[in-house]
Image (cartoon, rainbow, N blue to C red):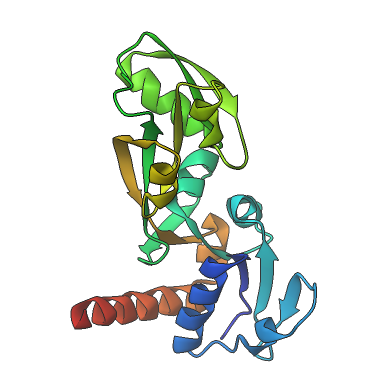
Amino acid sequence: MDKAVTFALAKGRLANKAVELLEGQGIDCGVLREQGRRLVFDGPDGCRFLLVKPSDVPTYVDHGVADVGVVGKDTLMEENRPLYEMLDLGFGACRLCVAGRPGTSLNDRHLRVATKYPRIAAEVFAQRGSTIEIIRLNGSVELGPLVGLSDVILDIVESGATLKANGLCVLEEICPVSARLVVNRVSLKTKESAIRPLVEGLRAALKEERKEK
């Protein structure tokens, strides 16, 4: 690359798929396959990779510590940072939904909502004209309705198997969610010669990949 680019990648499955796409564009990501607890990796072509918590990717990109990030649309909506959302990468597909026990009404004037997405929840239910009590949970939000902590949950749903196993169901789908490529606004100008070709290359590769399916 003409100018070294720093990537913020969400640990786990998103990072693995992101690496596959980046390598398809000629970026050497071999250092990411090294074993250990390292979080910062410097590639042989000058690129740097940061492995971070998914919810922190927008923060690193927004502050310019990373130029480019790969993160789920749900996280972008919750963080609401001033980033350029360049591409829908298509992987990590799921749905952002309101779920609860079958028959639960969402028309009640006051609902208790368990979620790790308080900003999204507030916005969604404000549009419905509902007053809600948001109960912030970071894991196993399905427990909320089961133990009486909340009336419903707002969370991402992939197959729906966990909901079904716990006697819950989707009550309303908010929007589809998938991994997105985001870019720092300043970096897009100062490193345009490196970032623009990458974006266009990924766009073409994704288009071809979808055509083959």
Give the quarter of the figure containing the N terminus.
bottom right
Where does residue 172 sit, x and y in percent of width and height? 29, 33
Residue at coordinates 46% horizontally, 24% vertically from top-left? Answer: 122
Residue 15 relative to residue 213: left or right: right
Give the quarter of the figure containing the C terminus.
bottom left
Residue at coordinates 60% horizontally, 57% vertically from top-left? Answer: 61
Check the image and name the residue furthest to the top: 109
Q: Is residue 185 above or below residue 100?
A: below
Residue at coordinates 51% horizontally, 61% vertically from top-left? Answer: 183
Q: Is residue 125 above or below residue 4?
A: above
Where does residue 196 sit, x and y in percent of width and height? 43, 74
User: Quadrant location of residue 89?
Assistant: bottom left
Where does residue 162 sit, x and y in percent of width and height? 45, 48
Q: 95 or 40: which is nearer to us?
A: 95
Residue 34 relative to residue 122: left or right: right
Where does residue 2 sit, x and y in percent of width and height? 57, 85
Q: Please say whether residue 25 is visible from this viewpoint.
A: no
Q: Please say whether residue 149 is visible from this viewpoint.
A: yes
* Number of marks in picture: 0
Residue at coordinates 19% horizontally, 79% vertically from top-left? Answer: 211
Q: 189 or 179: which is nearer to us?
A: 179
Residue 82 relative to residue 163: left or right: right
